[in-house]
Amino acid sequence: MVFRSSFYCLVLFLSLTFSSFSQQSIAFENSLIHFNQGREYFEAANYVAAREEFANYLSRQSDGQKNEVILAEYYQVLCSLYLNQPEIDVLGYHFNLNNPNSPQSNLLFRKMGLYFYDIANYAKSIRYLENSSLGNVEARYKLGVAYFETKDFDNALALFNEVKTDPDEEYAFSAAYYAGVIQYQQKNYLNAIADFKKSNGHSKYRKDLPYWLISSYQQTAQWDELLKYAEPIISTHPDLALLVAEVQFKKGLYAKSAKSFDDYLKEHKNEAASYKKGYALYSVDKYEEAIKAISGLLKQDSLGQKAYYLQGLAYLKLGKKTEAAASFTQSGALAFDPSQQEEAQFKSISISVDLGKWSESLLAIERFGKTYPKSSFTAAYQSFASDAILKLPALKPATTLIKSGIPVSEEMKVAYQTLTFNVGIKAYNQEQYKEAITYFDLAIAQAANQNLTDEASFGKAECLSQLKDFEAAIQIYKPLLSGKHSSDFLQRNRIGIAYAYFSVKEFTNANTYFKTYVDQLKANPTGKANANALLRLADTYLVAKNYSEALTYYNQAIENIKTEKDYALYQKGITLVYLERDIEAKATFQLLKKSYPNTKFGDDASFQENLISFRTGKYQEAIDGFTELINNQPNSPYYAESILKRAQSYSNAKQPEKAITDYKIVIEKYAKEAFAKDAVAGLQEELNGVGRPEEMTAYLSMYQNGNLNEEEKTDLEYQAAKGIYLGEKYDKAIEPLKNFVAHFPADERVSEVTYLIADAANRSNNKVVAFEFYKKVIEQNVHPSLNSVIAKVADIEFDSAAYTPAIGHYRLLKEKGVDSTVIQRANKRILESYLKLGELDSALIAYQEFQASAGKEAESVEQAALLYLDIIQLNNTKGNYATSNEMILDKFRNEFAEVSDATLGKAYLLLAKNLFELKNLAQTRATLKSIIDNSEDKESVEAAKALLKTYFPK
């Protein structure tokens, strides 16, 4: 309100003043003189004088609408403006109010706006130019600048965008420049670039404009445009050289970048630029120059960390791995950039691995893994670790790493397992079997790779076999023969387990695996093979007394094996002996001695030849052969046995004295030998034959004092007693067999001897002794013929009317899982026993068991029907006639309807008898007449007739 009041007061004052001037206008006739003089003063910038002249002129004018009057007022306001009068705003607005349609009104505001613009009073400038700039490019441009200076960028930009298209290049270029600045500040960099390019034609901005334009290119990542613009002006703007180098570097223009950095660094010292120069040189394969460029940066700071790393890379490219490792170590020791530090340490590890420093590498990997448990290089260092582990000569460094707690990959586990396996193999090859087992166990426990686990298990089994622990080896071999494995692996396991079984004399199992092994050899003849398996396979067949197969494989072994051929020939000869192909056997033994004169089986072959002569009754030939062996080979293992065999040959050749001499030598010198007992028997027979039995006493005593062990004495007594039994002298065998049991109650053959006693007694018709010892066999519960014995004991009890114990043994027999025929017989005997005992309820239960085991064929049904009638008879003895009839009618009308007439006749005769006992005479007569009229069994008909006469006499 203060402003409006002051304004109206001023207007009133001016009105009064102008009124007084007009009253005096008559006094001034020549007023134009003052007007013109005022124009001259105004143009000469004498604004005080000009204002005075214009005032004199206006004081003489009465018409305020004349052009000269308006013009004089216009000049008078401008003079106040230029004289910086405080009332200028009031004067200006007063002129505008009085002359709203005058051109000078708009022009005055423009002049005022431009004046205030020139004195940097942008707020007042905007006030006047906003209403007067239309159509005037200068005014609009300067209004835009005023907006710009007062931070009204939106209005400023709108005006600049208009002005920059004006033909007047002076204002257009400047407007474009200001528009570019605003667009840049508003991050409209593409528009800014276009405006800056337009303003480039004005020399006023050529100093600052490159920086705005280059910055805009940077902001929009227009690196190519930036370089295109900046590279040509570096000479005039040397401070752009570093920026150009940086952009070239950023774009990967390393050759240009290196040169630009080099030019820059000739005049400046900049460590960051030196590093980038070195990196650029490295990138264009100038490794030596790169190393030189960064030599001054190798310090204990962040840039030094990068420089050391770059130096390491350059050394690597030059093949200087040791120097590279040292550089990476230096970089890795600095922590300014953790990522760079981690990468440098990893590079150092990779070089260590590449240089074959396996143990050192694993220690570095362990440290790295603990420091960086989640490193992006984890997979890579794990791969390095795997390679290093595989190449280690010892296990300890790998074990330390695996147990260190760092992330362990499956590849590392497999590598560690491989190493433990390989160390185990090495120990095995050095015959350190216990140590090898330790390593194989480690490989098995790792279980990272199934094939390695299986191979380690096989290696352990092989070690156990070498240590003679065949049973343990077998338990490892067995599982390895199942599952998916290569044929070679299976073959190695088969031969391993086969030899293990062979070594523990389990020849049946050994045969199975040797046979499979040999069959696979035939199927895959190119595979790795152990030809001696043929020989062992033949041995197993020989042990099993399968002489034909044994001979086949001994022949194949002789053809294929490179070692043990002499053994194969000898075994072939033995097999031919068993096959009683004596001529071929002798020929084979002779071929053996001829082909292998130094063979250890020479004595064996000679002895076997002599045995053939002995066995075939060529006693003189045998005597000559044994004599030759005795005279020429005193150290032969067959020397003593040859004396015995010569004695037996003499006996058979009816030369008793010579036989007696040889028998005595055997007893005197070889009483401890197993065959000495044959000498005792032979001597006794010959002495008896020549009538000198008294000589035998001394030799028997000599033989008994021959320090025979308990086992040998036991065996002699057993064989002697059993020999009587086998000679079918059963009554004489009983006592010797009993004596054996009494002398050796803990011997494992007691069960067999007990059975022999029982059987001998049974065959001698001594039922009491047989029964006694059969029961002992049952108590022992181990004999192979146990079920047969139980049956015999049960039958003996049944036959002797001991039905209750018989039932117990028949039931025991059933529990043994015997075949159905035996079970059916036992069920029948149990039923018959209950019938004999008169136990009706038990008989009914036993009948159900019998019937369940009986067949459905007619004979079985017939037997079941007859036994059922026996149960009914037992029921009758208790007076249960009505129940018996129900049982007869139920079964014989249905289940037993198809039995024979004889059995049906018995059933219905029993029915008639029961009816008679029940006083049902009509049904009795009807039943008997039905039998007479319908039965085809004569015996039943006759019985019915007899009962009819008895029950109903005429």
Image: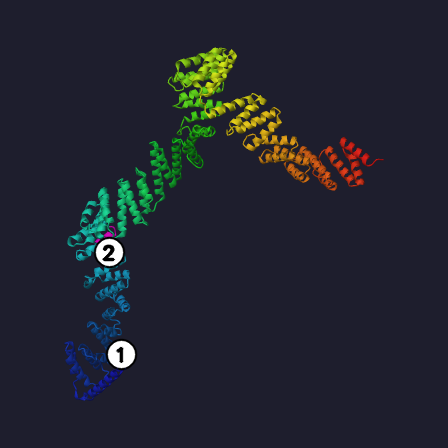
Q: Is residue 440 visible?
A: yes
- Relative placement, left or right, of 566 versus 363 is right
Number of numbered discs on residues? 2
Residue at mark 1 to residue at mark 2: CA–CA distance:
54 Å
Q: Which of label 1 and label 2 is nearer to you?
A: 2
Q: Which residue sits at x=21%, y=61%?
A: 209
Where is residue 370 drawn, in percent x and y? 31, 48
Q: Residues within 10 Å of mark 1 (few under 14, many from 20)?
A: few
**First to last magenta residue range:** 245-252
Q: Amino acid at mark 1?
A: Asn
Q: Position of residue 656 (x, y in %)?
A: 49, 11
Q: Where in the figure is residue 74, as x and y percent of width and height?
A: 21, 79
Indicate the quadrant where residue 121 lies.
bottom left
The answer to whether 319 is drawn above or below residue 591 in the figure is below
Q: Could you tell me the amino acid type at mark 2?
A: Leu
Residue, disc 2: 226
Q: Nearer the viewer, residue 381 or 232?
A: 381
The first of marks 1 and 2 along the sequence is 1
Above or below 123: residue 328: above
250 magenta-colored: yes
Secondary element under disc 1, as helix, strand or loop, is: loop
Q: Which mark is residue 115?
A: none
